[in-house]
Amino acid sequence: MKKTRLFAFFLSLFALLSLLGLPVWASEAETASASSTEAPWADDLTGYRENLLADAPDYEAGCETALLLELNSGIVVYAKNAESTVYPASLTKIMTCMVAIEYAGKDLDKMVTVSEEALEGIAEAGGDVRLQVGEQLSLRDLLYYLMVNSTNEAGNVIAEYVAGDIPAFVSLMNKTAKDLGCTGTHFANTHGLHDPNHYTTARDLSVIVRKALTYELFREICNTPEYTVPATNLSKEKKLTTTNYLILNDGNRYLADNGNYYTYYRSDAAGIKTGYTSAAGRCVISRASDGNMDLLCIIMGAQTRMMSDGSVRYDNFVEAKKLFNYGFDNFAYAKMAIAGSSPMFQENVKYAENKRGVVLIPSGDVSCLLPKEYDKEQVSTRYELDDPNGLSAPLSQGQKVGKLYVSYGGTVVGTTELETLTAVEEKPVDKAIADLTGKDVPDEEKSLFQKLLGYWYVPVLVILGLILILMLRNAVYRAQRRKAMERRRQRANARDAREARRLRQEQQTLRSSAPAGTRTPSRAGGERGPAQRRQQSRPVPEEPTRRLPGYGQNPTDRNDRGGRR
């Protein structure tokens, strides 16, 4: 009986620990995995730019509209009225050149004849006419005319060649702008001479320029300070000089507000285009790089100033140089992750042989554009694994297993892949058990056997229930048996007590019926008979104490005590 009770107790304890322990272990594993697989922040640079500019020094551009964009990241590090509607003037020719390259880039050496319609309205609108009706030039030379010295009629000649007529080409320009997401732009001509229905924004122009810079021919043409056009059927060889003084190193100087003279030229500048009308003011778009950052500067609505020495100062170039200096002086790329080095992360690996985990390292560098004096507490890193269920052995060295996200001010600004630092071998036994039970298999892919194993707790609960029922039944049975035995003992004690009283009464009766001083006569010769002898020899029983069977007393002995009844 004792062995049965001990076995039932330990079996119940084991089942209970299994029932309670496994969910706890699963919960711990899920918690550990969740700590390293949280999804990253939304890829929205608005919050990042707000934090970026909040840490940067104040600056005020001396023009109506300005924008400074870092081309590698697409981050705007300075903006003034960038969403306001403005007239683009000859900045329009950036779109004209890009559309021509896109639709007719293979026809650069094709000869194009200048039509009379291409020259209509140019002189009346205030533009200089440099081409002649009937003159024949290559499409390549026309593009240099358009971008280097900003010849207005070159845009119309190009439009007629590419699209058949000028309105059709302008429609292509507007379609391209729409496709690029330029919501504040509408073109009415190919050259940018003033038209109330011809407008854009600095933000849209930055989008257009970034697209145009993807064409190698555009980058070459827009950064050409001088170009020689060979002789044509109607003109001699001509030398074209750029209108962009930022890339023209001819010693042209201007008088600064501090009284010193400086050149417009900037050695790190590249392109791109100038523009001017009385309505648009002085405009320029240019690009400059210092090996760390690649900045795109847009200046619109700058002034033309008459200086105290009698010289004329073009503030579009002056403001562009100032804005470039502001960008390079106050911003730089900071390396937040180094390939194969830092940061490092420790991750658990399932079914690993003699290893609890593996170190994860970045597979590439992550650099972030930040103010040179940035708040380091704003920078943080997070990572997520490719497999939401975590890592499983075997793993090879350098295996790509996830992604690292670098954020500034709560916004993701750079990513790279994570790879394993070392290889991890598989422990076959653990893997075999997992394959059998389908532990890492999605529910919809599990076999019927694996699904049934998923309900292991049902038979455990059934066994527990049966054990508890048996234990309860045994306890009830033993209690009932004890009560029955107690009742039998009480009844036997009562019978013995009655028998003792009866015997005492008989003896008292015999004594009281005999004369005083005489013996009880016998049946013959004065001798006592067997009844008298038995009565005299029968001892007077004491009050009995009843004991239970099994403790050394035969329960039938009470019927033999004192002779026959």
Image: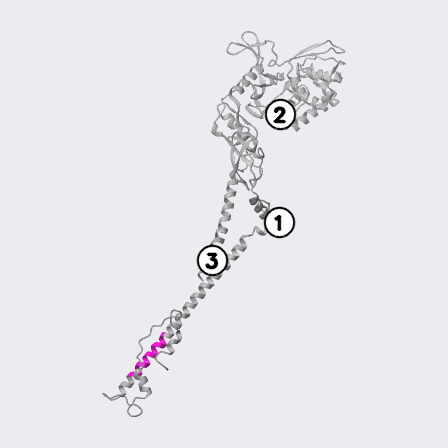
| Mark 2 Cα-neighbour bin, 10 Å: few <14, some 14–19, many ≥20 | some
Q: Classify mark 1: residues with Cα within 10 Å, few (<14), some (14-19) or many (20+).
A: some
Q: Residue at x 27, y 85 (%)?
A: 511
Residue 395, numbered circle: none
Q: What is the C-alpha distance between the residues marked 3 and 1? A: 35 Å
- What segment is highlighted magenta in the picture? 493-507
**Residue drawn at (36%, 71%), measured in percent from left and top?**
547
Residue 497 lies in the magenta stretch: yes
The image position of residue 78, as x and y in percent, is: 54, 23
Q: Position of residue 40 (x, y in %)?
A: 54, 35
The answer to which quarter of the image holds residue 146 is top right
Q: CA distance from mark 3 to mark 2?
A: 79 Å
Q: Is residue 492 visible?
A: yes
Please indicate whether residue 81 sits to the left or right of residue 127 in the image: left
- What residue is shown with label 2? 207
Count of marks, rendered view? 3
The kind of secondary structure element at disc 3 is helix
Amino acid type at circle 1 is Ser
Placement of the C terminus among the 4 image quadrants: bottom left
Query: Which residue position holds label 3?
Result: 7
Q: Nearer the viewer, residue 527 or 196?
A: 527
Of the numbered discs 1 and 2, the one sitting upstream in the chain is: 2
Relative vertical location of residue 220 with respect to residue 494 in this rendering, above or below: above
Whether residue 194 is visible: no
Q: Is residue 442 left or right of residue 11?
A: right
Between residues 81 and 463, which one lies in front from this camera angle?
463
The amino acid sitting under disc 2 is Val
Mark 3 or 1, nearer chain start: 3
- Find the residue positioned furthest to the top: 309
The residue that disc 1 covers is: 447
Q: As shown in the figure, which amino acid type bears the numbered disc 3?
A: Phe
